[in-house]
Image (spheres, rainbow, N blue to C red):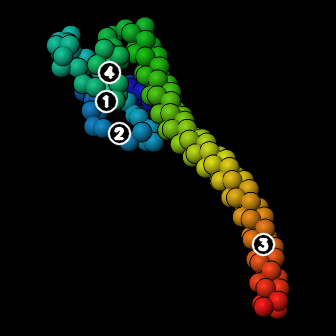
């Protein structure tokens, strides 16, 4: 039985080890788990299943990109299948990396939006502070003028009280 592994190697544990049926798992495999592919060159039949019955070697890969089962009596076909499996695995890794980078991009854009909002909030607070500081200065000036005027009125009132 020949086994193909996700690192692109083929393994033949021994020739003539009985009838070997090809076996390709179609179970969903988590993205962080390695994919193992096993198939046999022994007793290969010429009956090819219909194209729509081909098991998915890489379930997350679109149907038209799936590696087709090799012609079991052709070493060239086996090599092409092995290369296709390697390419499919690399494609899967690149898609995974793209997804991670897109998620990171979303996070960074959210942080940027938050920083811009905080910057706008800080600018608004600075403008409000300036306006309130100016209003405070104006009110203090008005208060001091009122205190002076009140003092003058008291003095005038006391003079009138004293002259009457």
Q: Which residue is mark 4?
A: 62
How far across and how far down the image is residue 140, in percent?
A: 76, 67
Viewer-side label of 4, 3: 3
Q: Along the line of sight, which residue is nearer the eye, 118 or 35? A: 118
The span from disc 2 to disc 4 (Cα, nearest Å) is 15 Å
The span from disc 3 to disc 1 (Cα, nearest Å) is 90 Å
Along the horizontal axis of the image, is 56 left or right of 139? left
Q: Along the line of sight, which residue is nearer the eye, 91 or 51? A: 91
How far across and how far down the image is residue 153, in percent?
A: 77, 78
Q: Which residue is mark 1?
A: 59
Of mark 4 and mark 3, the one earlier in the sequence is 4
Q: Which residue is mark 2?
A: 29
Marks 1 and 4 in Cβ contact (< 8 Å): no
Of mark 1 and mark 2, the one earlier in the sequence is 2
Marks 1 and 2 in Cβ contact (< 8 Å): yes
Check disc 3 and report its element: helix, strand or loop.
Answer: helix
Along the horizontal axis of the image, is 20 left or right of 119? left
Viewer-side label of 3, 1: 3
How far across and how far down the image is residue 113, in percent?
A: 56, 41
Viewer-side label of 1, 4: 4
Tell me the quadrant of the picture where the N terminus can be found: top left
Specify few, some or many for label 1: CA neighbours under 10 Å numbering under 14, 14-19, or 20 or more: some
Residue at point 58% right, 45% down?
Answer: 117
Q: Which residue is mark 3?
A: 149
Residue at point 62% right, 45% down?
Answer: 120
For residue 10, the mark is none
Residue at point 70% right, 58% down?
Answer: 135
The span from disc 1 to disc 2 (Cα, nearest Å) is 8 Å
The span from disc 1 to disc 4 (Cα, nearest Å) is 8 Å
């Amino acid at each position: 039985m020949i086994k193909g592994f996700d690192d692109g190697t083929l393994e033949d544990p021994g020739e003539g080890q009985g009838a070997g049926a090809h076996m390709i798992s179609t179970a969903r495999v988590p993205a962080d788990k390695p994919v193992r592919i096993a198939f046999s060159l022994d007793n290969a039949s010429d009956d090819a299943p219909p194209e729509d019955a081909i098991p998915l070697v890489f379930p997350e890969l679109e149907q038209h990109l799936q590696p087709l089962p090799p012609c079991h009596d052709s070493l060239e076909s086996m090599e092409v299948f092995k290369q296709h499996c390697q390419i499919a695995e690399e494609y899967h890794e690149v898609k995974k990396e793209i997804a991670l980078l897109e998620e990171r991009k979303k996070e960074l854009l959210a942080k940027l939006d938050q920083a811009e909002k905080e910057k706008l909030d800080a600018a608004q607070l600075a403008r409000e502070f300036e306006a309130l500081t100016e209003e405070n200065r104006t009110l203090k000036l008005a208060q001091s003028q009122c205190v002076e005027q009140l003092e003058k009125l008291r003095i005038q009132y006391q003079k009138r009280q004293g002259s009457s």
